[in-house]
Amino acid sequence: RITSVSLRRVLDSRGNPTVEADVLTESGGFGRGAAPSGASTGEFEAIELPASESIAKAREHAVPRLEGLYAGDQRAVDNALRAADGTDDFSAIGANSAVAISMAAAKAAADVLGAPLYQHLGGAFRGDNFPVPLGNVVGGGEHAKEATDIQEFLAAPVGAPSVSEAVFANAAVHAAVADVLDERGIPAAKGDEGAWAPPISDAEAFEVVEEAVETVESEVGFEIRFGLDMAAAELYDEAEDAYVYGDGTKTTDEQVEYVAELVDEYDLAYVEDPLDENDYEAFAELTDRVGDRTLICGDDLFVTNVERLQEGIDVGAANSILIKPNQIGTLSDAFDAVELAHRNDMECAISHRSGETEDTTIAHLAVATDAAYIKTGTVGGERTAKLNELVRIADDAV
Ligand code: PGA
Ligand code: ZN
């Protein structure tokens, strides 16, 4: 049973304060979780409060309800967090404290059981598949100024024989991108997730990434494709009713056409948020056109929310969903979204945020839920924390 929940402010990868939770149990179990933070957040996400405010509210309202609960009963813990908050979007205590506590409780329970977290979360009937890591290698948007309009170009080593080879392939693509940029005399800083953020057009970025992927593919000898997170809600201008790029605008029809052409020209494996987060209809049109050969994934569209996901299922808006526990506030809610997606033959990608910590929960979550993909960057300590944990899980060394 939970005997104490302590909360503190720690740094995230952008240097902003975030919430870390420690959960202790009567039998000596210990778990620690830390909340990530988005920059291109969806309009319908659960609410993140300033860390100190969220901590104060959670201490007052949530902690007293948690003490005495069995840490292994994740639903009870997460229901107590919801009851303590009393809103639909965690705007009272903050989704940042909620998700930190939810993850810390799961880890404390795993500790009591002496089981790795993925085993505790996934249970005895878990499959033995590993997720393909989507590696952000070039990006811009809200994650880097003066770089590409498209937020993320993602290496997708779909043919990798093991998770370890996939992780190293993504790192090799990241390095190969640096070489291609260097040859072209293009300087590049890194964006928030560690991807190269060169001051080039999207068209040139496609060339650079394609060349880097082909180089690494021929070195490793297995299939590497690539994909995108267009984060199109950030490109969409409501007043103009158009997608605004550095070199012009596109109507919704033009955007659908553009993305469909990109899918075919570059054999894209994955396209996240190709359209605005309110446009289920255009999502459905695009999925109808290219969903047989690529994953159309809803991030800002679904925000890990089962109601929004069900709306999407009803109209065929996408064939995959991005899962971010902090978008919805608890692990139980994230599991519900995964289950609903899987029941409807949709793939899941478990995802980090642009602001991250060393917390490795999402690596365990991806394995526990049998997710097809994990999106957690390529380089940088807060990203490699998850990737290396995935390698350890595959090696049975956690
Ligand atoms: P965010 O971006 O964490 O800044 O919201 C990640 C994403 O859009 O997938
Ligand atoms: Zn996204």
Image: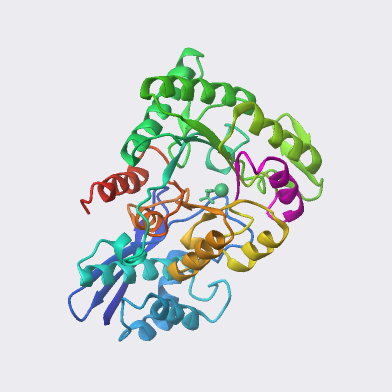
How many marks are shown on the rendered structure?
Answer: 0
- Relative depth, front residue between 311 and 64: 311
Q: Position of residue 275 (x, y in %)?
A: 69, 46
Indicate left or right for 113 with 256 as reference. left
- Numbered range of the magenta stretch: 276-297
Residue ID at (72%, 41%): 289
Quadrant of the image occupied by residue 258: top right
Q: Is residue 169 above or below residue 289?
A: above
Q: Is residue 182 above or below residue 261?
A: above
- Relative depth, front residue between 133 and 88: 133
Residue 10 part of the magenta-drawn span = no
Please indicate, yes or no, whether residue 20 appears anywhere in the rendered image.
no
Q: Position of residue 227 (x, y in %)?
A: 55, 36
Q: Position of residue 303 (x, y in %)?
A: 58, 59
Image quadrant occupied by the N terminus:
bottom left
Indicate left or right for 385 with 79 as reference. left
Residue ID at (62%, 41%): 230
